[in-house]
């Protein structure tokens, strides 16, 4: 599937990502669409930027730092502070789809694999 001409790619994080907006000329923000298959949990990781997950469809369980895991549904927005561990589990029988909004813009060097 492609979004705005950019293909959806499967990542080592165990989810599909389609970049919507991530351009050097707009360093203050990036937006990507993530898709997690049913029954899958993404890899534990942290990013060095502020991040928000905007849940579009499906349901899941969010793991954020040392907090108790919590359920997320369409319409929920999860604020993720920089450098805090995170992962999300798809608890539904359909794809879990959400937008990842990062400020400033996400780049590969922002990502830390914690597994």
Image (spheres, rainbow, N blue to C red):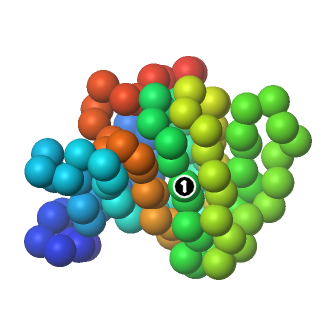
Q: Is residue 74 left or right of residue 47?
A: right
Indicate whether 21 appears above or below 69.
below
Q: Residue at x 55, y 21 (%)?
A: 114
Name the residue carrying label 1: 52
Q: Residue at x 87, y 41 (%)?
A: 68
Helix, strand or loop for disc 1:
strand
| Residue 59 visible to an observer of this rendering | no
Please provide percent x and percent y for residue 87.
62, 42
Please provide percent x and percent y for residue 15.
44, 51
Quarter of the view holding residue 85: top right
Q: How many marks?
A: 1
Specify the quadrant that holds the N terminus: bottom left
Please state which of residues 69 and 115 is positioned toward the viewer in this rendering: 69
Please state which of residues 17 and 76 is positioned toward the viewer in this rendering: 76
| Residue 25 visible to an observer of this rendering | yes
Q: Residue at x 17, y 74 (%)?
A: 4
Q: Is residue 66 left or right of residue 11?
A: right
- Number of residues whose C-alpha sits closer than 10 Å to that of mark 1, classed few (under 14), some (14–19) or many (20 or more): some
Q: Is residue 98 left or right of residue 86?
A: left
Indicate whether 32 appears above or below 105.
below
Q: Residue at x 71, y 40 (%)?
A: 64
Please provide percent x and percent y for residue 110.
37, 29
Please provide percent x and percent y for residue 108.
28, 32
Specify the quadrant that holds the C terminus: top right
Quarter of the view holding residue 73: bottom right
Q: Residue furthest right?
A: 68
């Amino acid at each position: 599937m492609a979004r705005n001409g950019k293909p959806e790619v499967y990542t080592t994080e165990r989810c599909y990502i389609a970049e919507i907006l991530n351009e050097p000329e707009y360093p203050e923000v990036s937006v990507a669409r993530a898709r997690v298959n049913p029954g899958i949990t993404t890899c534990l990781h942290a990013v060095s930027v502020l991040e928000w997950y905007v849940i579009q469809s499906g349901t899941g369980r969010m793991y954020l730092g040392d907090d108790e895991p919590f359920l997320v549904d369409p319409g929920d927005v999860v604020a993720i502070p920089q450098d805090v561990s995170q992962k999300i589990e798809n608890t539904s029988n359909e794809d879990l789809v959400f937008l990842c909004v990062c400020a400033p813009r996400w780049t590969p060097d922002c990502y830390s694999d914690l597994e």
